[in-house]
Amino acid sequence: MNLYNYVWTQDGITAKDSLVYPFEERGLQFGDGIYEVIRIYQGNYDLLDAHIERLYRSAEAIRLQVPFNKEELITSLQNLAEKNAVHTDAKLYLQITRGSAPREHTFPDVPSNLYAYIEESPRPAAQLQQGVRTILTEDIRWDLCYIKSLNLLPNVLAKQTAKENGAVEAIFHKDGQVTEGSSSNVFIVKDNMLFTHPAAPNILHGCVRDRVLTLAAESALEVHETTFSTQQLLDADEVFITSTTSEIMPVIEVDGNRIRNGRPGMITRQLQLAYEQVSDIQQTAFI
Ligand code: PDD
């Protein structure tokens, strides 16, 4: 996908080809940093404040200095979109690490490194319409997955296994309970009630997850933030996953088992439509 030409670093906006990453860098050597992925619809950021709030929560959790305050960060991201004249659907990737220093595990006394870039990213319209296949895989990650850290090896391995099995997402489970996806949160619908894992430290508190909970409350849907088992997942009336890039994505298969009749359900559809409205998405994926 097309990368926009200008990137933003702690030193300002620069052309992406002039960005040189240092040899000894904490993000590269230790995964010692945090990130966010933020949606852009037709040139406008979506859920920007929520992502920035989470970025600061992640930074605080790993005792990382963010070199800007929240307002400066938001203004700079807006400047970056303007400088690139972004007008399409896109996504912003923002990363902050503990800086460049000789490789010692303990914290160096150096400034953090930050960079942000924007990439074109069309909405996955066909998948939003038809739904996707998923697999189940054991959640072998650490206990602090609410931190959006650069350490994504278990997620990478799980997603690759999903791909090799003809699926687009791997759904993690621990002790028989579903936690979240490798890059998404997981919801089930049973008897007209919505269930999702509580916003506990062992999952990422997704910005789209939060929005879905708000939309569900507004539509008087009964919501339970409780854990559910892999068997409940397989027996669900509807299943969907949520993330910045996949929005509200219907799941039609888990480990080869069809959910319902293999078609996205009514409640999922209603939430998808409400999501398009609240995000001010101009072109519907459901015609
Ligand atoms: N991933 N859980 C995990 C492990 C994630 O990596 C993500 C997002 C989510 C959903 O969060 P949100 O609704 O705020 O996007 C849940 C991003 C998109 C990524 O790593 O590419």
Image (cartoon, helix red, strand yellow):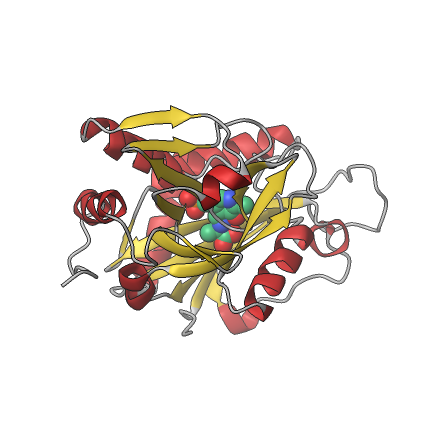
Count of marks, rendered view: 0
Q: Residue at x 50, y 69 (%)?
A: 16
Seen in the picture, residue 218 relative to 255 is either above or below; the reply is above
Q: Residue at x 35, y 53 (%)?
A: 249
Along the horizontal axis of the image, is 204 left or right of 245?
right
Q: Residue at x 47, y 62 (%)?
A: 7
Query: Which of the 4 quarters of the picture holds residue 108?
Result: top right
| Residue situated in front as seen by the camera: 229 or 119 | 229
Along the horizontal axis of the image, is 243 left or right of 281?
right
Along the horizontal axis of the image, is 35 left or right of 13?
right
Seen in the picture, residue 55 relative to 101 is either above or below; the reply is above
Query: Which of the 4 quarters of the picture holds residue 170?
Result: bottom right
Residue 43 x %, y %? 26, 58
Seen in the picture, residue 116 relative to 167 is either above or below; the reply is above
| Residue situated in front as seen by the camera: 273 or 112 | 273
Residue 52 appears in view: yes
The N terminus - image quarter = bottom left
Residue 185 x %, y %? 46, 42
The C terminus - image quarter = bottom left
Residue 18 x %, y %? 55, 71
Residue 184 x %, y %? 47, 47
| Residue situated in front as seen by the camera: 3 or 37 | 37
Along the horizontal axis of the image, is 267 left or right of 79?
left
Residue 11 appears in view: no
